[in-house]
Amino acid sequence: MALLLRTQLLILTSCLAIAKDNPTITVQVVNTQASERQLTYTTPGHSGSSNTTCDTNGSAIDTGTVTSINANTNCTTTSSAPTPPQTHTRTIAQEHVYAIMPDGAHVTLWCQAGFRHCYYLQPGSYTAEVKGNSLWMYAHDLSGKAHKIKYRAVGGW
């Protein structure tokens, strides 16, 4: 049992040593602006269609010299009207954060609420994790809970 516990502890410490931490920096937020982006897309139309179904029933009487046939055919046609293509317009809320990086570079950070949750960041200092061209900013709500919000660097200002 002790050997199993030591082995598990060794594996856990090895995994922790291999795990990479993303570098954290302090970002100075100067201003935040909210905006809306207009999105337009088109759904294709459909051509009309028609379908006919027929049902035939009947009987034949053979008297030896004459064959008499009595039959009825009932047909039903269903149609669907064509629909034209439709253009839809939607708006997506966005946040643009103007910030100063630790090296003094002025950057614009962008968050689109349609894909993730964004916060209006008040001016001040924020801790952020750097992941490629993105910053994961830590913002605190009124209860003090930290929220990690993804912002993309989109240029300077």
Image: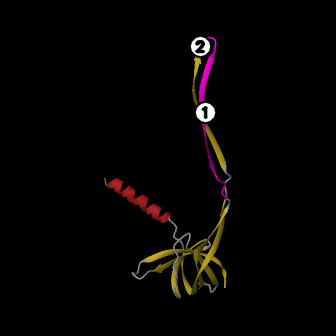
Q: Going by the picture, which residue comes out furthest to the left?
A: 1
Q: Circle 2 sits in a helix, a strand or a loop, which is it?
A: loop
Q: As drawn, is 8 to the left or to the right of 27?
A: left
- Which circle's residue, 2 or 1, is located before the other in the chain? 2
Q: Does the magenta stretch include residue 79?
A: yes
Residue 113: x percent and y percent?
55, 73
Indicate which disc residue 63 carries.
2
Depth order, front residue of 118/26: 118
Q: Residues within 10 Å of mark 2 (few under 14, many from 20)?
A: few
- At label 2, the amino acid type is Thr
Q: Of discs 2 and 1, which sits in the foreground?
A: 2
At 57% from the left and 26% from the top, the residue drawn is 58
Depth order, front residue of 91/151: 91
The quadrant in which residue 144 appears is bottom left
At 65% from the left and 46% from the top, the residue drawn is 50
Q: Going by the picture, which residue comes out furthest to the top?
A: 64
Residue 100: x percent and y percent?
60, 86
Q: Tell me the quarter of the image containing the C terminus.
A: bottom right
Residue 151: x percent and y percent?
57, 75
In this rendering, is residue 29 above or below 114?
A: below
Residue bearing mark 1: 73
Depth order, front residue of 125/19: 125
In this rendering, is residue 128 above or below 71?
A: below
What is the magenta range?
A: 63-83
C-beta proximity under 8 Å, tags 2 and 1 = no
Main secondary structure of the magenta stretch: strand
Q: Is residue 105 magenta?
A: no
The answer to whether any part of residue 119 appears in the image is: yes
Depth order, front residue of 83/13: 83
Q: Circle 1 sits in a helix, a strand or a loop, which is it?
A: strand
- Number of on-image labels: 2
